[in-house]
Amino acid sequence: MALALLCSACGNGGQSGKSDGCGELATQEYAKNLKMGSPCDENLLEVRSVVGHDTLVKRFALRKRAEGEGAAEGVVDLSHGRAKETVLRVPLERVVALSSAQVGFLLRLGLMDRIVAVGEGKEGADSALYARVQRGEVAEVGNGTSISLEKILAVRPDLVMDFATGGSQGDYERINSLGIPLMLTSEWQEEHPLA
């Protein structure tokens, strides 16, 4: 999922997710909670997360970043009869990753320099990232009831990656109220290891 979002500035990359006309997004072969495609020539990413009895669906329109431009435009109606989408300027430059799994994905993609904050540094998946947290180069913003919205705002992220564990969605709602693009990931809900 992070690969799709961070590398999307390169276009569709030959992906079969391009649909005819302005149809539905293509379901990915291994990831049931992720859809991607380019209906109506707009690169879109859709992430589904099951939280308790609810299924949250968030759509992102991925647009190439112009030099000196911020990453987020907020929620906009791109019409075409679709739901509202959050426009992200890609590639992303400043990411808050609240889950150690998200941190691991970003590290594996060689994107440690894009991480500006983590939930808790002591859960660092990498000694170099842990050292950056210790030096204050990467902020610790907390998790759960201890999350600091002020610290999240202070790092000016392009995107906050939060996670759901099947319980309350209170963190999601609190962070979402900031107006910063927010992606709720549920990679643990996937059934295939390649998801």
Image (spheres, rainbow, N blue to C red):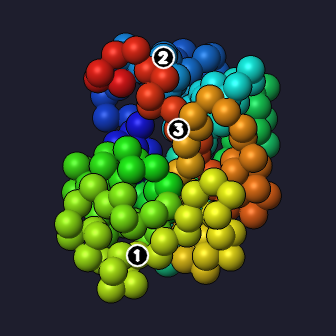
Q: Position of residue 173 (x, y in %)?
A: 76, 49
Which element type, helix, strand or loop, lies under badge 1? loop
Give the numbered dot on residue 185: 3
Q: How many marks?
A: 3
The amino acid marked with disc number 3 is Thr
Q: Quadrant of residue 72?
A: bottom right
Please name the residue that numbered disc 1 is placed on.
Answer: 138
Could you tell me how far apart the alpha carbons at marks 2 and 3 are, in whole angstroms?
Answer: 12 Å
Tell me if mark 1 has few (under 14), some (14-19) or many (20+) residues whose alpha carbon lies within 10 angstroms of its own.
many
Looking at the image, residue 58 lies above or below residue 134: above
Q: Quadrant of residue 12?
A: top left
Rendered residue at 29%/23% (across/down) = 194
Q: Position of residue 64 (x, y in %)?
A: 47, 56
The amino acid marked with disc number 1 is Val
Q: Counting residues from the N terminus, which is met first, the one under dot 2 or under dot 1?
A: 2
Could you tell me how far apart the alpha carbons at marks 3 and 1 are, in whole angstroms?
Answer: 21 Å
Q: Position of residue 52 (x, y in %)?
A: 70, 25
- Mark 3 near mark 1, Cβ–Cβ under 8 Å? no
On screen, residue 63 versus residue 174, left or right, reads left
Q: Counting residues from the N terminus, which is met first, the one under dot 2 or under dot 3?
A: 2
